[in-house]
Amino acid sequence: MATTLGTPTSVLAPVHSAGWPFVAGFFAAAVVLGFVWPPLFWLGLLATSWCAYFFRDPVRTTPDDPELVVSPADGVIASIRPRVPPPELELGTAPLPCVSVFLNVFDVHVNRTPIPGTVARRAYHAGRFLNAALDKASDENERQSFRIRSASGADVGLVQIAGLVARRIVGFVDTGATLQAGERIGLIRFGSRCDVYLPPGTAPLVIEGQRAVAGETVLASLTGPQQPRRGRRS
């Protein structure tokens, strides 16, 4: 069953296990505040509900095609342009097609692998906490990078980037792991960005400003005629 943003399936989704300590912490704080002044308990309970909503982990339906690259994150396509990949990915120094997805604090923050394949490299890079919507955040912010190699030998880079509020990037898999497309790969807490680096000559099939759904929205195809997609606002 397909899942779309804003439907009951996505809003009432289960909480990811990584979020339960935070939900419990928010609730404990609400109880303590309630003893100080009862109305504060209800404000704390509201904050606890938001925390549970933030860590929701809905089921997604991923296209069963090894040549498709799907979005690793829910959010808005913020940028589509060639970019030199982070050196820790070891993808060379030439610019590669890069699709950036910006996540606000209301988006699902469980990230998924864009292609089926093997994690050839995972690396962490300490950095700043600029607004993730800024272009320079890709180069200067704290990040965690994955290089995933498909069965056909194509390499796709996924970079989780911390944002202005995000202070913690969590990875669920390590080097050598074999993944299916759309499988959960990590989580960024409280506002962030994901960059997907495509093989040379790959044309993205999305446009800037488009909403993406993790594990479902097709960003590109690794085979076939490569023609950039055009669109318009209406």
Image (spheres, grey):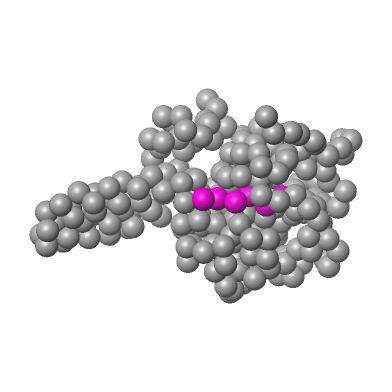
Q: Position of residue 186 (x, y in %)?
A: 53, 55
Q: Residue at x 63, y 49 (%)?
A: 101
Whether residue 140 appears in this view of the structure is yes
Residue 118 horizontal side relative to residue 15, left or right: right
The residue lying at 54 percent from left, 69 percent from top is: 129
Q: Is residue 3 above or below residue 143?
A: above
Q: Position of residue 153 (x, y in %)?
A: 81, 51
Give the magenta part as a residue range: 99-104
Q: Position of residue 113 (x, y in %)?
A: 62, 48
- Is the stretch drawn in magenta largely helix, strand or loop? strand
Q: Residue at x 60, y 68 (%)?
A: 141
Residue 59: horizontal and vertical position, in percent?
Answer: 49, 36
Say whether residue 154 is magenta.
no
Q: Nearer the viewer, residue 181 or 118?
A: 181
Q: Quadrant of the C terminus?
A: top right
Does residue 146 show up?
A: no
**Residue at the farthest front position:** 234
Residue visible at 52% across and 30% down in the picture: 3
